[in-house]
Image (cartoon, coloured by chain):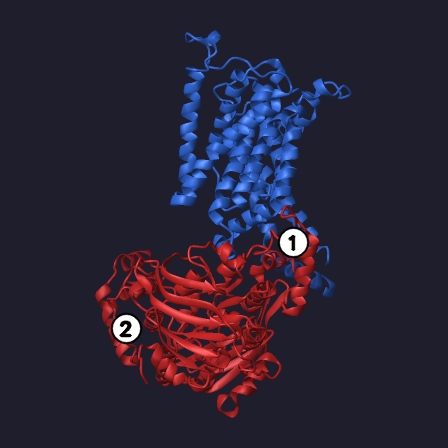
Amino acid sequence: MANPITSLRIDHITKRFPGIVACSDISLSVGKGEVLALVGENGAGKTTLMNILMGLYMPDEGKIYINNKEVVFKSPSDAFACGIGMVHQQYMLVPNLTVTENIALGLSQMQVEQAGNHTLERMKKAAKLDLNTVRRHIIAISEHYGLAVDPDAYIWQLSVGEQQRVELVKTLCFGAKFLILDEPTSALTPQETDELIALLKRMSSELSIIFISHKLAEVKALSNKVAILRGGKLVFRGNTADHSAADIAALMTGHQVYLPTNQNKTEPGRPMLEVHNLFVRGDRGNMVLNKLNLTVRAGEIVGLAGVSGNGQRELAESLTGLRTIESGEVLLDGVSLVGKTPKQIIAQGMGYVPEERNIEGIVPSMSIKENLVLKDIAKAPFSLGGMLISDKKIEENADAMREKFDIRCSSVNVAAGSLSGGNIQKVILAREISRGPKFLIAVYPIRGLDLGAAEFIHKQLLALRDSGVGILLISEELEEVINLSDRIAVIFKGQIQRTLGHGEATQRKLGMMMAGVKEI
Amino acid sequence: MKNFKLIYTAGVILLAVLLSLGIASLILAVLGADVFKTFWVIFCYPFTSLKNLSGVINIMTPLTFVGVGICVAYRSGIINIGGEGQMLFGLLCAIVFALYSGLEGPASIPLIMLAGMIGGAFWGFFPGILKSKFGVSELLSTVMFNYIATQLYSYCLRVPLLDPAVAGGAGDPQTVKLAESQWLPRINEVMENVPKGTRFHTGIFIALVLAVIVYFFMWKTPVGFKMRAAGASDRAARYGGISVNKYLVLAMCISGACCGLAGTVEILGVHHRGLGNCTGGYGSSGIVVALFGGLHPLGVIPAAFFFALISFGCSALQINKIPVPSNVIDVLMGLVILVIVAAKLIIANPYLMDRAQRKVLSLLKRKEAA
C-alpha cells in the first residue's frame, strides 16, 4: 500500500492538443487534509489537468511531485500505486454485478499488478477471486468513513447517489489517499448533494481532495482552497473563505454574472398546454404517469420540479409524440395531440429542448448549419418546392443564428458534436426558438453547463416567455426553477404533488415536496 | 509549416505504399516468383492495351453500382451486406422479363433494367421492414436473404429457365441467350471514332450517371437529408420529427435497386444469359469498395476503378505465366487494402499529425542551433 500523501504539487504543467493549448503552465499544490476546488467554465482545462494527474495523459511540459518527490505517471495504474484515486463523472460500474463483484473486479487486477513480474505469482493471484475478503474490506471501509453501502446489492438496483458511494468505496478500497472527484454532484438530487458534501467534509480530515465543480454553492460549502482555470490558464488561487461566490463567478467567466430572474412583467394569457388525466407507461411496461394534470398558459413558465425518475422524461416524450399515450387528453392551443406523430406535433408549434442534448437534440456528425434546419429542411426557404436543398439559404440562416445566439464555433460547417455542451445547447435553442413555437418544453436546459452559458440560456427562455410562448421547464435545480418560473409544479411518482405560485416556493419547501411530503 | 499537412499526408501514403510493397515482395520472394514482374503485371499490365483497360472498366461497372448502393444504406444507418442476394434476385427478374415479355429492340433495355431494379429493391425491402418493424438485425437478415436468393437462382437456372441445349446433364446449367437487340452495346458499336480495341460495354456510363444522381439525391434533396440524419443519429432524427423507420425501408429499397441494376447490367453487358456464377462476387466486394470510397457515391468511382485494376491485374498473372497460386493473389489484394485503410486512418487522426509536426519542428530547431 502507498504511503500517506502529505503534499501534492503540480509544477508548470502544459498540455497541448491539436489547435489548442488545454493546460498552459499550471502550478498547484494541495496539502494534507486540504480540499481544493477546481472551478472553471467548460473547456477551461480542468478535466485535462486531472487526467494528467491520473496518468491518462502525459504532460508536454512540467512535473508532478508527491511528498516533494518527483513522480512520472505513465498509466493510471502508476497513479493508483501512488495512492491517487479518481471518481469520474460517468460511473464505471457493471450493472448486472453486485457491489462486491464490481469492486473485486478492479481489486484483483490491482493485486495481479502488485505481484510484479513473477509469472507464477501473477497467475495465482489472477486465479483466486476471494469475494469474502473483498466483502469484509468493503464493510470495514464503509463503516470507517460512514459510507452506507450494501455490498450484496446489484448495481442496477441502486440510485445514482448510491452508485456514486460505490465508486467512492471502490476508490478507497484500491488504497486511495488522495481523491479526485470530477463534478461529483452533477447527477445527484439536492438531498443527495447535501449528504455527499457532509460526507466529503468528514473524509477530508483523513484525505486530501480535489474536486471539480461548476456549482459555487458547493465550492463554498466544501473547499478550503480554490483554483480557477480559464482558457487553459490558472487565473486565480486563494482561500475559499476570503472570497464571495460572486467574486469566484466573475473570475471564472471573466465578467460579472447576474443569473436572470423572472420579473413577472407580463400577465399570462390563454391556456396553451392542457394535460388531463394522463396515463403513460415507462420502458419497463409499468405505469409511470398516473393521472397527471397540468396547465401551462401562454406567456408563462411553469417549472416542473422533481427528483429525476418520477416521470419527467416520460411526460416530455408523451407530449412530443415520442411515447404512446395510454389514456388521457393533451391539448396544445386547443388541438388534441393524442395519437399524433412527432412530425405532426412539431407542425402544431411544439418546441423541444430534450434531456440528452448530444444524442437527442443534435445529430453530432452533421454540421451546425444542417442541425439548425433539422426540423425544417423540407420547407421553404431551405428547399425549393420541397425538392431541392438551397445550401445558400441554409448557410445564411446559420450565420444569422450564430450571430444572434452567440454560438462560438470556427465555422458553421463543423460537426455539431465537436462543440462544447453550452454551444450545443445554443444550437438547439436557436433552432427551436427561430421556428416560432407556441410552446416549448425544456428538459434540464442548463445541466452540466457553465455559468456563462447558463446565464445566456436563461435570458433566452425569459425573453421567449415575454413574447407570449408557454414554457414547461423540467429541472432538478431548485434555484433554476425558482428563478425562472411563474408557477412551480412538483412531480412525484407520476403525479403533480402540488402547484405553488411564484412567491410561495422556497428551496426547503420544494425539496420536501419532491421527496413526497404533501402538506407543509 | 503551412504545407505540413500536405507533406505529412504524402509521407504517410508513400510509407504505406512502400510497406505494402515490401511485405508483398517478401511473400512473393518466398514463393520463388519474380517480384518485379509480378508487380508490373498487377499495376502496369492493365494499362498496356486498350483491350486490357476495357477489361478493367468492365469490372469497375458492377463494383460502382454495388458500391453506390451500399453507401445509401450505410449513410441511412443500415449495413447492407445482402448485395449478392439483391444482385441475383434483380438479374433473375431481368432475365425473366427479357425472355418472356416478348419485347425486343433497344427500347426494351431500359425496361429490363427497371425490372432488375424492382427485383433488387424487392429483395432489399424485406430486411428493411424486418429491422424497422421487429428490430431484426440486418446483418442476420441480409445474409439469410443471400442464401435464399442463391438457392432460388440455382433452382431457376436448373429447372424452369434451363437452356434446352444443355439439358440432359452436359455442360453447366445456363439460360438461353437473350436476343442480341437486348444486349448493352459495346462502346465500339455505338461510337465510330474510338481507337481499335476499346470494347468495354456502355454500362459504365449508366453507373457513373447513377453515382452522380445518388450523390445529388442524398446531399441535395430533403429526403436524402432526412435519410442521412436518420443514419447518423436515429434518436436525434426521431426527436426532430423524422420517421426513421420509413426512411430505413426506403434506404434498403434504393440500395437493393442499385445492386439489382448491377446484376442486370452484368447480364446485359457481359454474359448475355444467366450463368452459374454471374455475380462475380461483386455484391460482397462492392462493400469494400464503398468503405474504400469513404461511403460517398462519388468517392466510390475512383475506389471501384482501383479495385478493378488490382483484380484485373491479379487475374492476368496466370495469362502472363507467373507461377503464383491464385489464393496468394487474394492475399496480396487483402494486404494492399489493409495498408491503404490503415494509412487513411493515420492521415485522418489529428493527434498523430500534431505529434509528428512538433517532433519535426523540434528537430529543425536543434539543427539550427547546431
Drawn colour of chain B? blue
Which residue matches tag 2?
A149
In the visual, does A282 lie left or right of A303?
A: left
Which residue matches tag 1?
A380
Q: Circle 2 marks a residue in which chain?
A: A
The residue depicted at 60 percent of the width and 48 percent of the height is B222
Residue A327's quadrant in the figure? bottom left
Chain in red (letter)? A
Residue B28's quadrant in the figure? top right
Taking depth in this image into account, of A336 and B59 the one nearest to the observer is A336
In the visual, does B199 lie left or right of A60?
A: right
Residue A259's quadrant in the figure? bottom right
| Quadrant of the snapshot with the C terminus of chain A | bottom left
Q: What's under tag 2, amino acid-wise?
A: Val
Residue B178 versus residue A109 in the image, above or below: above
Q: Residues within 10 Å of mark 2 (few under 14, many from 20)?
A: some
Taking depth in this image into account, of A122 and B254 the one nearest to the observer is B254
Total number of numbered discs in the rendering? 2
Q: Position of residue B317 (x, y in %)?
A: 58, 24
Rendered image: mark on residue A388: none
Secondary structure beneath disc 2? loop
Residue A330 versus residue A169 in the image, above or below: above
